[in-house]
Structures are given as structure tokens and as C-alpha cells.
Amino acid sequence: MSLFENEKNIQSTNPRQGFARFRPLRATQAIRDQHVEVSISASDFIYPYFVVEGEKQKQAIASLQGIYRLSIDELLADLEETLRLGIDKVLLFGVIDNSLKDDMGTAAYANDPLIVRAIKAIKQRFPQVSVFTDVCLCEYTSHGHCGHLHHHDVDNDATLPLLAKMALEHARAGADFVAPSSMMDGQVYAIKNALDTAGLPTRILAYSAKYASSFYGPFRDAAGSAPAFGDRKSYQMDYRNRTQGLREIAADIEEGAHWVMVKPALAYLDIIVQARMDYPFANIAAYQVSGEYAMIKTSAAANIVNEENAFFESLTAIKRAGANQIISYYAKEFIRKGL
Ligand code: PBG
């Protein structure tokens, strides 16, 4: 039989019948929809919020078009829509005035912190929302680094009790998950100990494989958290490493993390895939970070890509790689546009 003789009859992808045919599976939208392996729903998303002091504050962020810094009242108003879309998980970042920052990041964990008030307000109004909080000092330190400085570098062990205190404040206020992102060694261990000692069941979402990335640029603009000098390469991971990211994940699971994270997402899909294979039962979150969002926004504005197609494709790729949850500034648009 010649290779092409019976091609009209071949409906399967079985190569024994000549050659593999995939196109029948792609013939129409309906048929394509019947063969989908990966789809995303609202429950996969965690939506990030930037919280500021005051009332009626809705501040545009130049580098993150469509995302705002919101005062707590505005955040509650916005949450109504987020919930209507079916997204019930949020990740909170505090943004404070420079005048309130000091070298120890005190505002993160003392004197009724902004995020503590935000958690309480959300929980009171919308108890069904799962509140995740970022646990890191860079938004609160005058130098913009993620911990306590010693000779121009972050002192790992001196930072741990500060992170534990911050996490404890969030947990006491009712956070469902605390999410340590400072990339200090032992941050999960320190937080877990503090929570256990206080008898709090609060879960830990560990930013485990967090790479020193150029894609955090817009976030630092949004949160006012750019380091005043140097960079974060002495604590965030070197992107030339893969196995080290897996070891970070292993250590965090060992230390008591309930969920782990890979961040950023799109440039690190290999890490997500490998983590999924190594830890089939782990809950792996991936963060489509500010730079990933801004790249799609700006290239769409320049008519280089179709925005919807680009974010559907990117977010689906993150889920396809094996992420259980996706933190994304596109979460609401994704659901609004429907898949
Ligand atoms: C805090 C933190 C950062 C992000 C999440 N938590 C900034 C950083 O590490 O510099 C980045 C998120 C984003 O870019 O969307 N350390």
C-alpha cells in the first residue's frame, strides 16, 4: 500500500495506518474544544492587590496599566467584582509612604500594620475570600532590600524573626495563607515555628524557586520597593540554575510549606514541569509576574500581539506545565473574556 493510498479514510493518529493524522482533531472549533487537555477556571487564580493607606484611593500604576493601588475601602469595592467573576483568592501587598519606612521595615509588623487592617476588613465583609499575604520586608524598608542589612548585604538569620513576626501578625488577623517571598534561608522554618507555637493553623505558600528576575520591574514601581543600591542576587536565585530551584522546593516542603511557588512563570516553565514530576502531590503555584503582564500589555498596545490571545496562551502554558494555581494580574480579564 502506498503511503498516501488510504489517506481519506484515516481518522486516527495511528502511524501504522500510513502516517499520523492530527488535523482531523483540529478541523473545527467544536472538535478542537472536544480535544482540550488543559483549561483554566476561576478557581485556579489568585489575584494580587496593592493596598495603600487612606480612603477613596485608586492610584493608577504607570507600568502596570489596568492595575491600581487601592485603599482598603476601594479594595472591598473591587473585590465584589472579583468575587462575581468567581475568583475568591487574593494576594495582598502593602505599599506605604517612604516617610513610614525604616531600616528594619518596622511598619511591616508593628503598630497595627496596613495589611493587618486589610485582612480584617476583607474577612469581615467577605469571609468566603481566601486571603494570601506577601511576607517580605522590601515594601517597608528604607533601603528597599528584603531584610535586615549588615554591611550592605541582607543578614539572613537576623531577618528571620522579623519575617516570623510579620507572618504572625497576618495570621492573627485572619490570613488564610502567609506567603514568604524574601528568599531568606529558613524563612519557612521560622514562620512555621512561630505559627505552631501560637497554635495557628495558617497555611504557608512558600515562594520557593524565586529567581532574581528583570521581570519584577513594574512591581517595584507599583510597590515602591526597588532596592536603593545593588540588586537582590545575593538572596534571589540565579536564573542559570535549575536543580537548585528544585532543592529550594524540597527544603520548603521539608520545613512545612503547604504550597510551593515558582516565580516568574513563563521563563521558568521547565522548573514547574520538573517540580510537578518530582512532587506529584505538591500544590504548586506559579506567579505570572508584573513584567510578564506588562510585556503583553505594551506589545498589544503597539499592535504586535493580540492581547487576549497572548494572555490566554501564556496562562494556559503555565497550567499545562503543571501549576495548580496561577497568580496573575490578568486573572479578572481572563475570566471576563471567557475561554
Ligand atoms: C517581594 C515581592 C516581589 C514580587 C513579589 N513579591 C518583588 C521583588 O522580589 O523584587 C514581584 C511580583 C511581580 O513582579 O509581579 N519581595
Image (cartoon, rainbow, N blue to C red):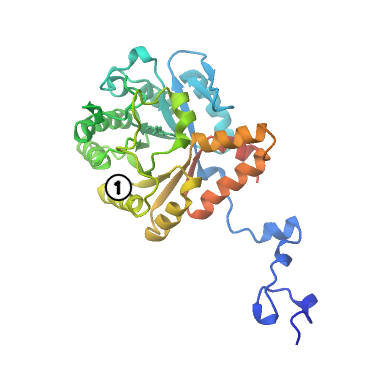
Q: Nearer the viewer, residue 258 or 216?
A: 216
**Residue 220 location, quadrant:** top left
Badge 1 element: helix
Residue 156, given in percent of the width and then of the height, sits at: 22, 35
Label 1 CB less than 8 angstroms from ligand 1: no
Q: Residue at x 70, y 35 (%)?
A: 303
Q: Is residue 80 above or below residue 271?
A: above
The residue labelled by disc 1 is 252
Q: Report the side of 329 relative to 231 (left or right).
A: right
**Residue 33 location, quadrant:** bottom right
**Residue 162 location, quadrant:** top left
Q: Report the side of 3 relative to 189 (left or right).
A: right
Q: Does the image show residue 125?
A: no
Q: Residue at x 25, y 37 (%)?
A: 191
Q: Nearer the viewer, residue 238 or 335?
A: 238
Residue 195, given in percent of the width and then of the height, sits at: 25, 37
Q: Nearer the viewer, residue 234 or 44?
A: 234
Q: Is residue 35 above or below residue 337?
A: below
Quarter holding the N terminus is bottom right
Q: How many marks?
A: 1
Residue 254, given in percent of the width and then of the height, sits at: 26, 51
Q: Residue at x 27, y 41 (%)?
A: 188
Q: Does the image show residue 155?
A: yes
Callout 1: 10 Å neighbours few (<14), some, many (20+)? many
Residue 10, given in percent of the width and then of the height, sits at: 74, 76
